[in-house]
Image: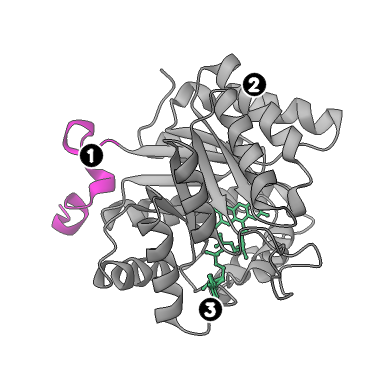
Amino acid sequence: MNVILDQRTSRAAPSERPPFQVSFEFFPPKTDVMEERFWASIGKLAPLNPRFVSVTYGAGGTTRERTLRLVSRIKSESGVDAAAHLTCVGATRSEVNAVVEGYRAAGVARIVALRGDPPAGVGQPFEAHPDGYASAAELVGGIRRLGDFDISVAAYPEKHPQSPDWSTDIDNLKRKLDAGATRAITQMFFDNDDYLRFVERARAAGITAPIVPGIQPIHSFRQISGFASRCGASIPDWLAERFEGLDDDPETHALVASAVAAEQVLELVDEGVTEFHFYTLNRSNLVLALARLLGVRPD
Ligand code: FAD
């Protein structure tokens, strides 16, 4: 028998493993067909009893009403706790505060607080609204002043593209947590070493809050590599090689995607990770399979 395999948490008996917590991120659907898929996926993932299901906030606040409507409905219809993303882009402090008040009135007590990206694109310099919040740290402080929200913030295992160095990046994360955030959720990453080194850096800087890995299953390698390059997440050569030539072979692509995501998640489990945030892209199939590997089953 292989002693090393026996010591892996991912191979431990259910009674000997820590319980795993999951959360799921969705985006506001743009069409009726997409909305149908959105609710079908919520219907499949809600019974897994996630910590929360979150809904993103479109660039420039373009989905403000939809995000609120969807988050309120998730909570009332599925019974699952829902979190609304919120950004500072293109809005005054009082406009952003009014959105926070709207969430509170709808019974939404969880917010994912972000600076957001300029409407011109991720690579452009961010210019705060003259009367607006200038950073996620300021936004967290503003939300805190408005009530007792559970606030998550973003973290970047490969450094935020606009952070000049690691200490600026980690200091910024610390500021957000010190301002009142409860946890950090990471940008997608595909090399677990990036995440593990990032957590080490954060702990060395005195950050004690959970840093939940954001896992992006690769439904479409072409689409995800496009997203990744826009948000500063790198695609390792070995990963690109695994998907090479599969654009016209959806069946093999899906099997490889499932194997790649399973490997990433189980490796993190063996490194002691017990919480995962899944970027669902409004689809449930791969995420359902990953939850199953974690022993997370419908109630
Ligand atoms: P911040 O933490 O404010 O930091 C951004 C950069 O500015 C960092 O490099 C930081 O070092 C620097 N910085 C901060 N304060 C200062 C300062 N005072 N002076 C100089 N530099 C400073 N985007 C959306 O539009 N909608 C969403 O719903 C959304 N959800 C997301 C969810 C997650 C889990 C993640 C990881 C990202 C999400 N994003 C979303 C993307 C996010 O808006 C971008 O990554 C954005 O570029 C940075 O947002 P932030 O909250 O990390 O910003």
Q: Nearer the viewer, mark 3 or mark 1?
A: 3
Marks 3 and 1, how far apart in space?
35 Å
For the C terminus, the image quarter is top left
Marks 1 and 2, how far apart in space?
31 Å
Q: Nearer the viewer, residue 42 or 292?
A: 42
Q: Earlier in the sequence, mark 3 or mark 2?
A: 2
Q: Quadrant of residue 221?
A: bottom right
Residue 52 on image: x %, y %:
48, 33
Identify the residue at image location x=22%, y=52%: 8
Disc assigned to residue 18 = 1
Dot 1 beta carbon under 8 Å from ligand 1: no
Labelled pair 3, 2 in contact (Cβ < 8 Å): no
At label 3, which amino acid type do we have? Ser
Labelled pair 1, 2 in contact (Cβ < 8 Å): no
Q: Nearer the viewer, residue 126 or 217?
A: 126
Q: Quadrant of residue 97?
A: top right
Q: Is residue 93 visible?
A: yes
Neighbour class for label 2 at 10 Å: few (<14), some, many (≥20)?
A: some
Q: Nearer the viewer, residue 95 or 178?
A: 95
Disc assigned to residue 135 = none
Q: Is residue 150 left or right of residue 249?
A: left
Magenta extent: 1-19
Dot 3 beta carbon under 8 Å from ligand 1: yes
Which residue bears the numbered disc 3?
163
Residue 13 against residue 85 in the figure, above or below: above
Identify the residue at image location x=44%, y=21%: 298
Identify the residue at image location x=54%, y=28%: 108
